[in-house]
Amino acid sequence: MAACDKKKVVFIMGSTGTGKTKLSIDLGSHFPSQIINADKIQVYKGLDIITNKVPESERRGIPHHLLGIIEDPEFDYSPTLFCDHVISAIEHITQQGHLPIIVGGSNTYLEYLVEDPTLDFRSKHDCCFLWLDVSLDVLFPYLDKRVDEMADAGFVDETREYFLPEADYSAGIRRAIGAPELHEYFKVENDVNVDDETKQELLRDAMQRMKENTHTLARVQLSKIQRINDERSWGLNRIDATEVFEAVLNGSAYQTLWKDLVFNPSKQIVQSFLEAYMSESKAAE
């Protein structure tokens, strides 16, 4: 298939908390686009706080696909089903003349999509990969801050609705960081034989383990992206957002830094990607 006949697709990759969602919406507001979620936990309905789903009010009217589409909390959402959904969404979006932007941190699922020989995705799609990166020594305290903000937003009440004494935390939406960590607290929360101090200690321990497990997730995600960058010919465009997150942690204004260091470089990369497509199309005429 000629390059000019391929469907154009933009991917935004990165560890958890690096600003992927914000960048996707910023780019989607600049280019006629629709966004496809590539977070295997955000496909489930519910637990919006701990899964960090972007609220409808913050989507700026940009259509989002694969967000909260699975109602069964125990359903096993496989890479194969993810690929079927993504390919269907791409077809729908491109038929409307819009650019698909695939955004999320489930890198194993993304690699399956792009590299599976049966799907042969690269022969049918022209891909632009953006990699949002933040130094871990800056990202970790930001992630801790985000967990504290989740607590303020009511993630305990939200997660309680999914508590089962014999819950399986290895599948479905209960894999989300926060659900397994709160299990021991919920087990004794209404037990009159357990004192309040013990309950509060269990809650503090759950939040600390949430922070530690989120660090681990970020580290694993980064390792996978680095491996993909080393082993696959994806041509990842790395965008370093560390300085932006330093400003956030310091309570400084970060909007100008975000625009200069993240949005504008990303916009230029996508613009060049689309212009190259237009040039190829004209040359083929």
Image (cartoon, rainbow, N blue to C red):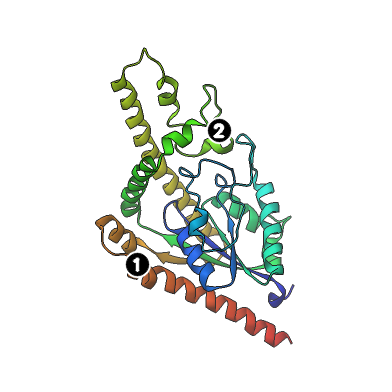
- 86 left or right of 164 in image: right
Task: In the rendered structure, find residue 219 and report the number of the disc placed on it.
Answer: none
One can see residue 95 in this view: yes
Distance in Å between CA atoms under marks 1 and 2 = 38 Å
Instruction: Please give the residue where the numbered disc 1 appears in the rendered image.
Output: 255
Quarter of the image for residue 98 reads bottom right
In this rendered view, identify the residue nearer to me: 166 or 235.
Answer: 166
Q: Is residue 30 above or below residue 40?
A: below
Residue found at x 36% / y 12%: 193
One can see residue 179 in this view: no
* Horizontal and vertical percent position of residue 248: 30, 58
- Name the mark nearer the viewer: 1 or 2: 1
Q: How many marks?
A: 2
Which amino acid lies under the numbered mark 2 shown in the image of this protein?
Ser
- 95 left or right of 229 in image: right
* Horizontal and vertical percent position of residue 135: 35, 56
Judged from this view, the residue extending furthest toward the top is 193
In this rendered view, identify the residue nearer to me: 239 or 52.
Answer: 52
Instruction: Please give the residue where the numbered disc 2 appears in the rendered image.
Output: 170
Q: Quadrant of the N terminus?
A: bottom right
* Horizontal and vertical percent position of residue 277: 63, 79
Q: Quadrant of the C terminus?
A: bottom right
In this rendered view, identify the residue nearer to me: 106 or 224.
Answer: 106
Which amino acid lies under the numbered mark 1 shown in the image of this protein?
Gln
How crowded pointer 1 is (Cα within 10 Å; few <14, some 14-19, many 20+) is rated as few
In this rendered view, identify the residue nearer to me: 163 or 61.
Answer: 61
Numbered disc 1: secondary structure: helix
